[in-house]
Image: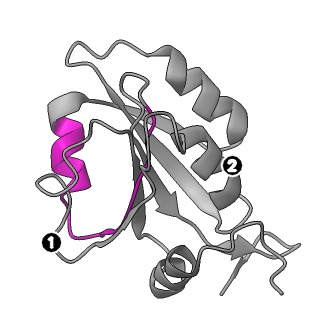
């Protein structure tokens, strides 16, 4: 058995291939998964039905599975922070957040350093989240690989 909450074999495999500085995209149900992710990114579709699973549910499991150094969320083109962003911040309160307008977010999500897409069935507006994989710090604050 595993010590992590995550038991999804494809997600565990994909996380095992990522390293410090790699990015994970957790997308909502309306995200253009094929055209706005890198061709070589591993893609896992958990969007069975509307609302199943949500980005927040996936994030809650991932935060127990991989160190998260930074998060970026998609905003409308005018940069307005959305209610869903408060939900994400409450799940990972110590992680710094960036707010990226929609079309710039699409560009960021297509960068080669995005190694994993997890598609959700979340139907909330602008519920798209990029997570930068961090590294584990030891008790002295130094990186541990």
Looking at the image, which is closer to me, 63 or 32?
Answer: 32
Q: Residue at x 52, y 25 (%)?
A: 85
Image quadrant containing the C terminus: bottom right
Residue 116 x/y as whole percent: 38, 68
Residue 43, picture quadrant: bottom left
58 left or right, relative to 123? right
Sooner in the amino-acid sequence: mark 1 or mark 2: 1
Is residue 93 shown to the viewer in this render? no
22 left or right, relative to 86? left
Residue 93 x/y as whole percent: 71, 37
| Span of residues in magenta | 104-122
**Is residue 68 on the magenta stretch?**
no
Marks 1/2: CA distance?
26 Å
Q: Residue at x 44, y 50 (%)?
A: 48
Position of residue 75 relative to residue 139, above or below, is above
Residue 35 x/y as whole percent: 10, 54
Image quadrant containing the N terminus: bottom right
Q: Residues within 10 Å of mark 1 (few under 14, many from 20)?
A: some
Q: Residue at x 70, y 30 (%)?
A: 90
Kindly indicate whether the residue at mark 2 contacts the one at mark 1 (C-beta within 8 angstroms). Answer: no
Position of residue 112 relative to residue 32, above or below, is below
Q: In the rendering, which numbered label is found on residue 80?
A: none
SS for dot 2: helix
Q: Residue at x 22, y 53 (%)?
A: 33
Residue that carries the numbered disc 2 in the rendered image: 60
Residue 13 x/y as whole percent: 52, 85
Which residue occupies the extreme right position in the image?
139
**Is residue 107 on the magenta stretch?**
yes
Residue that carries the numbered disc 1 in the rendered image: 39
């Amino acid at each position: 058995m595993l010590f992590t909450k995550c038991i999804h074999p494809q997600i565990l495999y994909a996380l095992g291939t990522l390293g410090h500085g790699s990015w994970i995209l957790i997308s909502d149900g309306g995200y253009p998964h094929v055209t706005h992710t890198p061709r070589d990114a591993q893609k896992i579709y958990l969007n069975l039905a509307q609302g199943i699973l949500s980005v927040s549910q996936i994030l809650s499991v991932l935060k127990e599975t991989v160190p998260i150094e930074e998060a970026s969320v998609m905003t409308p083109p005018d940069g307005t922070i959305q209610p869903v962003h408060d939900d994400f911040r409450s799940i990972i309160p110590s992680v710094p957040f960036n707010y990226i307008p929609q079309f710039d977010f699409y560009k960021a999500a297509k960068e080669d350093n995005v190694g994993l897409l997890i598609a959700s069935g979340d139907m909330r507006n602008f519920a798209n989240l990029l997570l930068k994989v961090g590294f584990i710090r030891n008790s002295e604050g130094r990186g541990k690989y």
